[in-house]
Image (tube, rainbow, N blue to C red):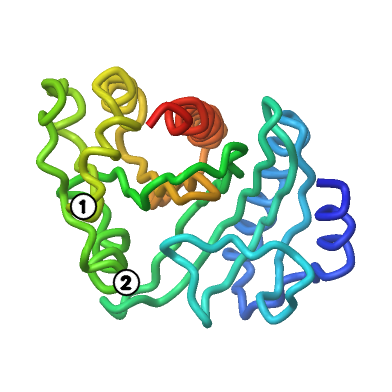
Amino acid sequence: MKRRLQAVGRTLHPAIYSLTPRHLVGRNAKRKQLELFADKVGMVYFGGVSQQSDEHHIVRGLTVSNKHRDDHYCVGTYRTYDVIFVERTDTILTNHTHTWHIFEIDLKSRNDVPHMFIGSGTHGLGFHSLLKAKYPTLTPAPLNTLAKYPDSFTHNFDLFVTPSHAIAAEQIIDTKVAELIGTHCKGLVFEITPDSVFVYSEKPHLSESLLETMLANGVWLANTVDETSRLI
């Protein structure tokens, strides 16, 4: 993490956009909000990043592209997990500009974890557009193969995975994990890869409560994946 912070410090630069005075005031307010949050949870705020440089860690996952814009980049460690936050803006296949707030949490186990998404079956236009375009082989798992899933999860989320990994996905996102996600994580999207857990929000307004929810639940899920994946 120390090397990562040093590299980021060398390559970050102030983001320069064509902003009206109203938008500039809003951006400065968000910067202050995120600086305070970063300080509270032990992260370091850097601002805008250039994806043209390979010296900082680019947050990848579903939303990465060759034209996205990243701002409010924060790096740190939370409950022993390395964490990055970024606000990402892009114009996607729907020809609409989307803004995502993203936490990336590094997994520790690096076990054979299948690529999975946990998201609403009906909400999140940007999420569904990208998922369909980038990962057409990932489809909603039938669930209930190993045990009955709680309504709190099935009414609000789908578990997207390739059919060949459906059982492994149910072993990692079991009914107990699903119940906690269904109860505490409505409106969020999770992406799980062999290396990281990504937490996405498309909510238009950023609040301290939302940031705390994304971070705490993302680290909890990363820890759960680390522990469960060792057993399958």
Q: Is residue 26 above or below residue 211?
A: below
Q: Residue at x 25, y 48 (%)?
A: 165
Residue most toward the front?
A: 232
Which numbered marker is on residue 134? Answer: 2
Judged left or right of residue 199, residue 54 is: right
Q: Residue furthest top?
A: 176
The one nearer the camera, 72 or 160, is: 160
Q: Position of residue 164 (x, y in %)?
A: 21, 52
Q: Is residue 47 left or right of residue 182?
A: right
Q: Nearer the viewer, residue 100 or 154?
A: 154
Residue at the disc numbered 1: 164
> What quarter of the picture does the C terminus occupy?
top left
Q: Position of residue 61 (x, y in %)?
A: 47, 60
Residue 30 x %, y %: 63, 50
What kind of element bears circle 1? helix
C-alpha gap between disc 2 and disc 1? 18 Å
